[in-house]
Image: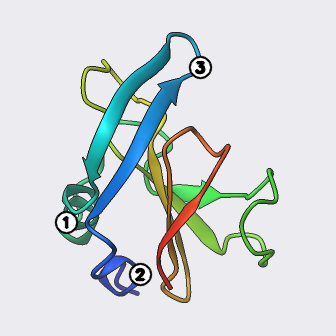
Amino acid sequence: MSRRSHIASPCRFVYESAPHRATGNVYEGTVDLQPTPDRISSGVKYPSRNDGTTFNNNEGLLPQQPAGYYTEYVVPTPNVKGVGPQRIVTGKNGEVFYTPDHYKTFTPVKR
């Protein structure tokens, strides 16, 4: 199954504040989400062990679905070394959600 169908054409720009648990607010402004779906579609994995892995929705903030339904991907955060707090979470039916704050809040960017 191609991942391309799960991430095609999300909302490109989101204005957010992306806080970091250890250091506070590390980024505020317009986030260009498109490079992450482009990376995923081309098969490139972000250098993080969790990029492209199952998102379990332990917080219960996304619609309840069977185990293995959601996948998470890292969205690089400017001025942060390593993995920052931003993620895109995709569902098997094409849903795309953005979280600027490591799963505390979600914004639907494609359904």
> Could you tell which of marks 1 and 3 lies nearer the N-terminus?
3
Disc 1 residue type (three-letter): Asp
Q: Name the residue under label 2.
A: 6
Labels 2 and 3: the sequence-earlier one: 2
Q: How far apart are marks 2 and 3 (CA)?
A: 29 Å
Q: Residue at x 34, y 84 (%)?
A: 2
Please, which colouring scheme is shown?
rainbow
Could you say whether the residue bearing mark 3 is in a helix, strand or loop? loop
Amino acid bearing label 2: His
For the residue marked with disc 3, what is the amino acid? Answer: Arg
**Residue for badge 3:** 21
Please give the residue where the numbered disc 1 appears in the rendered image.
38
- Which residue is drawn at the image coordinates 32% and 72% (left, top)? 11
Measuring from the top left, give residue 74's x and y in whole percent: 40, 46
Query: Would you place residue 4 above or below residue 18 in this image?
Result: below
On screen, residue 17 versus residue 47, left or right, reads right
